Image (cartoon, helix red, strand yellow):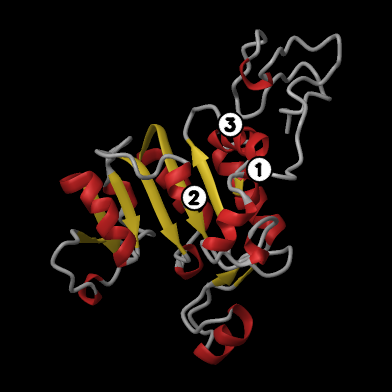
């Protein structure tokens, strides 16, 4: 649902799909054809005939990929496995993402602070106890993760909250757990569009107008010194850097 709403299911995109889920890979392959690329460190576990796979070590191989090679990068519960700097990996992914390209990710989350240990001496039992799985290098904390994404992607609204995109009845029909409707959890999806007006805020405004009982936000801040008009993200102040009119601290589009 979220990928569809935020532009992930458009035909012809050059897609890098890490540790691909086969059902989603099939859909993206139908849309992108040869432009779809699945990738994993262990390609032998993918026996499907329809999916194109490449071996990719996120710690060592991303540097070999040319700039702006992909229009979409997506991965779910991959970064907790990476035995190197997640920040460096995300910067490299941003480099190979084309302008206007989109990036979706999800990771396991517990608490506020990220806990990490890359030591090869840590036993499987210790990793299971600390991070929830024997091959995990870390467990992300909600505050630290969002700070990390802001540092790499820039300021903006990166957390996808389904309640802001869809009606409650739609979420129930899709059997989306209520814990995943809003706020940060292990179900959360984070989103970024490179160098473009944040799609999340645009779609959130549309959904809130349509959804029964949904809260609304003002389209202007009411400050006479703010130059924003009907759409603070696209006002005469000309500011589109992930957050509306920066001349006014009360602007509802300011982060």
Instruction: State which quarter of the image contains the C terminus.
Output: top right
Tag 3's secondary structure? helix
Residue drawn at x 23%, y 52% as measured from the top left: 29
Q: Do the residues labelled 1 and 2 touch (CB within 8 Å)?
A: no
> How many neighbours does mark 2 have within 10 angstroms: few (below 14), some (14-19), or many (20 or more)?
some
Q: How far apart are marks 1 and 3 (CA)?
A: 15 Å
Q: Is residue 247 left or right of residue 50?
A: right
Q: Is residue 48 left or right of residue 9?
A: left
Q: Where is residue 159 in the image (x, y as percent from the top left)?
A: 62, 48
Earlier in the chain: of badge 1 and badge 2, it is 2
Single out the residue that lies furthest toward the bottom.
Answer: 125
Q: Position of residue 172 (x, y in %)?
A: 59, 62
Earlier in the chain: of badge 3 and badge 2, it is 2
Q: Where is residue 228 in the image (x, y as percent from the top left)?
A: 72, 13
Earlier in the chain: of badge 1 and badge 3, it is 3
**Relative to 18, is 201 above or below?**
above
Which residue in the protein does label 3 denote?
202
Which residue in the protein does label 1 denote?
211
Looking at the image, can residue 60 be seen? yes
Which residue in the protein does label 2 denote?
2
- Where residue 55 sits, quadrant-wise, is bottom left
Viewer-side label of 1, 2: 1
Tell me the tag on residue 170.
none
Residue drawn at x 73%, y 43% as measured from the top left: 214
Residue drawn at x 52%, y 46% as measured from the top left: 191
Q: Distance between the residues labelled 1 and 2?
A: 16 Å
Tag 2's secondary structure? helix
Q: Distance between the residues labelled 3 and 2?
A: 14 Å
């Amino acid at each position: 649902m979220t990928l569809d709403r935020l532009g992930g299911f458009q035909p012809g995109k050059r897609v890098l799909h890490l540790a691909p889920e086969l059902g989603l890979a099939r859909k993206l392959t139908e849309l992108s054809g040869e432009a779809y690329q699945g990738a994993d460190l262990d390609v032998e576990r993918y026996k499907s005939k329809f999916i194109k796979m490449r071996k990719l070590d996120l710690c060592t191989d991303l540097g070999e990929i040319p700039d702006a090679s992909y229009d979409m990068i997506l991965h779910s519960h991959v970064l907790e496995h990476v035995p190197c700097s997640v920040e460096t990996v995300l910067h490299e992914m941003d480099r190979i993402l084309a302008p206007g390209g989109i990036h979706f990710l999800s990771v396991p989350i517990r608490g506020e602070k990220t806990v990490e240990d890359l030591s090869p001496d840590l036993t499987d039992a210790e990793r299971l106890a600390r991070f929830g799985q024997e091959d995990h290098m870390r467990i992300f904390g909600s505050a630290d993760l969002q700070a990390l994404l802001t540092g790499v992607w820039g300021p903006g609204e990166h957390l996808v909250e389904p309640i802001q995109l869809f009606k409650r009845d739609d979420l129930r029909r899709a059997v989306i757990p209520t814990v995943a409707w809003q706020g940060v959890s292990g179900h959360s999806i984070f989103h970024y569009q490179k160098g473009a007006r944040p799609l999340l805020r645009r779609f959130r405004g549309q959904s809130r107008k349509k959804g029964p009982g949904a809260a609304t936000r003002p389209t202007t801040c009411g400050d006479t010194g703010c130059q924003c008009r009907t759409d603070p993200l696209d006002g005469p102040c000309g500011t589109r850097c992930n957050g509306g009119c920066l001349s006014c601290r009360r602007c509802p589009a300011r982060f």
